[in-house]
Amino acid sequence: MAQINPIDHKETTTMCWFCERNPADPDAGVSVTLKRDISTKSTMHWEVTKANMYGIYIPRCKQCKEFRDYSQKLGKFVSWMIIIMIILVAAGFGINSILPEEVPGFVAPVVGGLLIIPVILISAKKIRKPENYAKKYDIMDYPELEAMINDGWEVSSVHY
């Protein structure tokens, strides 16, 4: 299937759709490829579907792109911290099983969980939030894209 280049009106769009205040950066925009099936022909061994493809470019500024990148990094960071905390608490229970009986049973798991706090504080400083960030987040609210989806088109791919 041929790659659709939805950048036809990239140079004519001057304002970021997400924040509505910064000039759009041609390299920061979001490209969405849509498809709509025209016909399907079934044979004995396979099914052939013909589809129309359409590309939409959503203008975005550099700051809003950075904000999305920040959000992605923050989500991954929080997920990893939860995983590490679970591992440390589980290790704490394992260590607890070999400690003398006079040590309370919750000490090692709690210590294991608390060990993650300095890591979170140090790492969180490395992930910074951009100063100007988007008012709109969902590309599905972009008017042209919303109209195409309401007309029966499906999102085939999104390139952030």
Image: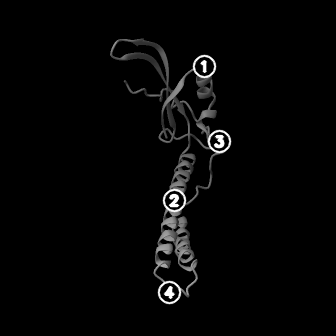
Of circles 4 and 2, the one toward us is 4
Q: CA distance from mark 3 to mark 2?
A: 23 Å
Question: In this image, 150 relative to 112: left or right?
Answer: right
Q: Residue at x 47, y 72 (%)?
A: 91
Judging from the image, what secondary structure is the residue with disc 1 in?
Answer: loop
Of circles 1 and 4, the one toward us is 4
Of circles 3 and 1, the one toward us is 1
Name above or below for residue 78 compared with residue 155: below
Residue pointed to by mark 1: 151
Which amino acid is tagged 3? Lys
Q: CA distance from mark 4 to mark 2?
A: 36 Å
Name above or below for residue 108 compared with residue 145: below
Q: Which mark is residue 37?
A: none
The quadrant of the picture occupied by the N terminus is top left
Task: Report if the CB atoms under discs 4 and 2 are less than 8 Å apart.
Answer: no
Judging from the image, what secondary structure is the residue with disc 4 in?
Answer: loop
Which amino acid is tagged 2? Phe
Q: CA distance from mark 3 to mark 4?
A: 56 Å
Which amino acid is tagged 4? Pro
Q: Which numbered disc flags the more N-terminal residue, 3 or 1?
A: 3
Of circles 3 and 4, the one toward us is 4
Is the residue marked by circle 2 packed among few (<14), some (14-19), or many (20+) residues within 10 Å? Answer: some
User: How far across and how far down the image is residue 90, in percent?
Assistant: 49, 69
Is the residue marked by circle 1 packed among few (<14), some (14-19), or many (20+) residues within 10 Å? Answer: few
Residue pointed to by mark 3: 136
Q: CA distance from mark 1 to mark 4?
A: 69 Å
Is the residue marked by circle 4 packed among few (<14), some (14-19), or many (20+) residues within 10 Å? Answer: few
Which amino acid is tagged 1? Asp
Residue pointed to by mark 4: 100
Residue pointed to by mark 2: 77
Name above or below for residue 78 compared with residue 47: below
